[in-house]
Amino acid sequence: MIDFLDDEILNDMVLEAKKYTKYGVVADYIPALGEANPETLSIAIYRGNKNYVAAGNIREKFTLQSISKVIILAVALMDHGEEYVFSRVGMEPTGDPFNSIAKLETNIPSKPLNPMINAGALAVTNMIIGESTAEKLGRILSLIHEMTGNTEITYCERVAKSELETAFLNRSLCYFMKQHGVVRGEVEELLDLYTKQCAIEVDCYDLAKLGYVIANEGKNPVTDRQIIPLHITRILKTFMVTCGMYNSSGEFAIKVGIPSKSGVSGSIMCSVPHGVGIGIYGPSLDDRGNSVAGMKLLEGLSSRYNLSIF
Ligand code: DON
C-alpha cells in the first residue's frame, strides 16, 4: 500500500535511482533547457487532502513542456467536445519520436495521429478558444491554478523565447498541417502560444497535484469540486497510457503500468487511479526524451507498491 510510503523510504529510492542519471543527457535542442543540472532527481507524491511525501528539492522549478499537452487537451475537449476535437486529431499511438513529421505525409488526410506528439498538440493548441494569445494562455493557466491551488504559476519567458527562436521543426509541422487545413490562422501566433504553454513553470508538488486531479476523476483535492468532467479525465488517462511516454509507452506500460506523461525538461506526471498524483523532475533524458532516473524510480515504486493498473 502506497499509504505506508514515507519520506525516508522515498529518499532511499531516489538515491538509488539517481545512479541512473549518468546514462542520459539533458535536452539542449531548446537551448535554455540545456542549463539544467543532469544529476537532479526529485519527486512529490500527493495522496489527497494535503497529504504528500517527497524527496529531493521539490521546490525547484522546471517547465511542463509536453506535459502541457494533457492540460490543453482537457481545455480543448471542454471547449469543443470530443467529436470536433477528434475530427482534427487522431487517437492512435505512433511508435515514432515525439517530433516526427513522417506519419503526417503517409496518413491521409494528414491528421496528426494523437494529441501527445508535437503535431497533434499543435493542432489541439490551435483549437483553444480566446480572442488573443494572452486570453488563451490565461485560460490554460486558470485550469492549472484550479487544479493545483497555486495561483502563482505562470510561464517562463526565457524558456518560451528560447524555444520560439529555434522551433524550426515545429514550424514545419504547422505549415504542413496548415496546407492540409488541420491548422488554421497564423502559424507564428500558434507557435507563440504553444511555446508559452510548454514553458509553464511548476515544481514537483504542483505537478503531483495536476496528476492527482486527473487520477481523482477530475475533482479538486480540497473542495471536491468537479474541475474536469469525469469522461474527459478517462480520455486523458488513456492517452497517457497509450502515448504518454512516446515510443517508450509500451515498455513503460509493462514495467510501470501507471498513466503518465513526460516532458523534455525531464518531468513526469503520473495519475495513479483512484487518487494518487506523482510529480518527478530529473532532467537527464534517454534517447526517446524521457527522464532516465525518473523512469527507474517509477519502476521501483510500481513494483514495491503494486501500482500497475494492469
Ligand atoms: O515542442 C517541443 O519539442 C517541446 N516544447 C516539448 C517536447 C517534449 O516535451 C517531448 N517530451 N518528452
Image (cartoon, grey):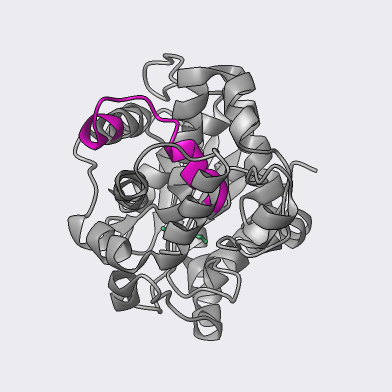
Q: Which residue is most to the front?
A: 179
Which residue is found at the position 30% from the left and 31% from the top?
Answer: 136
Question: Is residue 132 inside the magenta stretch?
Answer: yes
Horizontal side of 212 relative to 95 (left or right) equals: left
Examine the residues drawn in magenta and state their main secondary structure.
Answer: helix
Q: Position of residue 84 (x, y in %)?
A: 59, 22
Tell me the residue at 55%/39% (across/down). 182
Q: Is residue 214 part of the magenta span, yes or no?
A: no
Image quadrant holding the C terminus, namely top right
Between 35 and 113, the residue placed more toward the observer is 113
Instruction: Give the answer, above or below, for where 213 lies relative to 28.
Output: above
Image side of residue 1 versus residue 64, left or right: right
- Give the image location of residue 95, x and y in percent: 73, 60
Give whichever of 207, 57 is nearer the camera.
207
Residue 95 relative to residue 260: left or right: right
Magenta-colored span: 119-136
